[in-house]
Image: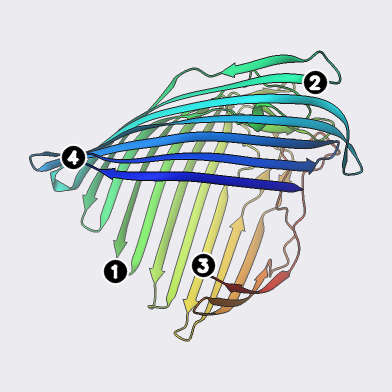
Amino acid sequence: MNYHNALIGLTQNWTGDQWTNESTIYATGFYFDHPFNFDYKRETNLGAGGRTTFERTFALGTAALKTSVGGEYQLQYRMANNFGNDGGQPADLNFSDEIDTRQGIGFAQAILDLSAGWRVTAGLSANTLRYQVDRTFDANAQPGAAESDFGLVLSPRLAVLKELRSVSIYASVADGFSPPTLDEFRTNEGSLNVTLAPERGVNYEVGAKGNLDRISYELAIYHFNLRESITTFSDERDTRLFQNAGGTRQYGIEISGRYALLEQLQLGANYTYQEFTYRDFVRDGNDVSGAQLPGSAPHTINLLVDYGFATGLYANVHYNYTDAIPLNDAGTVFGNAYHLLRARLGWRAGRWDVFLSGNNLLDQEMSFGNDLNPRFGGRYFQPAAGINGVAGVKWRW
């Protein structure tokens, strides 16, 4: 695979008597050249954009109101060619597209700090996105054009936080908008998903975070109702495709903590529970409503021990448990649960870092790249390596 990427930008900060402003302009470009199972893709992309944000704080008696307002606009032009695959080299041209993408975002936010530790945050964003494709060549059909314009979408957010000595508790509700990406709109086998709708959802969340002596902790509980969820599947050639899957319900709990046992010794722990299910979705004539969403593990646990010696020696150990993961919509195929243990031992001095690391030290059989809903050979798994290690030297300047 060949992938070359470039990004250049310029940022200016301005401070007036009452307002501050940060403005950025940028240009991007990349070249992508890569074979797939049955085809070969070459893409060249040029883009430009700008972003500006104005901020001001107002004194309201004993309260303070911090406001920010701004916007961003992006333009992209992509030349995309898909060929046949002849032993890893491009063969005859299958189709060629010129793609124009225009995206705009406007946003405003107000944070009101009240007495007695209360804080209220309100925000609103306005989003526009349009894809326009000019198919200049198609080996199997007449060239043509296609367009997806998602119009103007408003996304509000409201949050309330209360500080109680060493802990802060909060609640928030937010409306979300996630349009299809260009790779979801235009897939490798040549289809243009002009009917693919943006994901929309409302997220409700409550939580707490704080410090107790040497312990810092966070707790979040959320309920996310997603409409027009975009999920993946594969066709008979193992090409990754996308579709709207109706609605999904996503419940979750996230708990994390960190304990400074000694000045040089840090202990960390994280636990995540996820219950992601289809709310209403019929696939291939089968109603899978209530089934678990493919690719989501119900339980994950992470433990970390990090120790640094005064001599520059350091050591850390990371343990991860990932529960069994459903790999198809029907919930009949699962990736096995696994226990992943990693460790690193090293020495830092000035700009030097010499280290030895080991991965999958328990020699678990697992997959690090599950394919969801495959139709090509029933290939669900991409096996990960067994016990493996790396020795290296880093120098920073």
Asked whether 254 or 308 is in front, the reply is 308
Q: Residue 247: image x %, image y %?
A: 56, 25
Distance from disc 4 to disc 1, alpha carbons, whole Å, reads: 39 Å
Of marks 4 and 1, which one's residue comes earlier in the chain?
4
For marks 2 and 1, the one nearer the N-term is: 2
Q: What residue type is labelled 1?
A: Asp
The secondary structure type at the circle numbered 3 is strand
* Contact, mark 4 vs mark 1 (Cβ under 8 Å): no
Say whether marks 2 and 3 touch (CB < 8 Å). Answer: no
Three-letter amino acid code at the position of disc 3:
Leu
In the drawing, what numbered circle is on residue 159? none
Secondary structure at numbered mark 4 = loop
Q: Name the residue under label 1.
A: 213
| CA gap, disc 2 and disc 3 | 54 Å
Pointer 4: what residue?
18
Mark 3 and 4 residues: CB-CB less than 8 Å, in contact? no
Which residue shows up at 52% across the image and 32% down it? 249
Q: Of all residues shown, which one is farthest toward the right?
A: 87
- 3 or 4: tag closer to the N-terminus: 4
Mark pair 3, 4: CA separation: 45 Å
Instruction: Give the numbered dot on residue 304.
Output: 3
Disc number for residue 137: 2
Foreground tag (2 vs 3): 2
Q: Gap between marks 3 and 1, in whole Å?
A: 19 Å
Q: Label 4 sits on what residue type?
A: Gln
- Disc on the earlier residue, 2 or 4: 4
Sort mark 2 into few (<14), some (14-19) or many (20+) by Cα contacts within 10 Å. some
Q: Nearer the viewer, residue 155 or 283?
A: 155
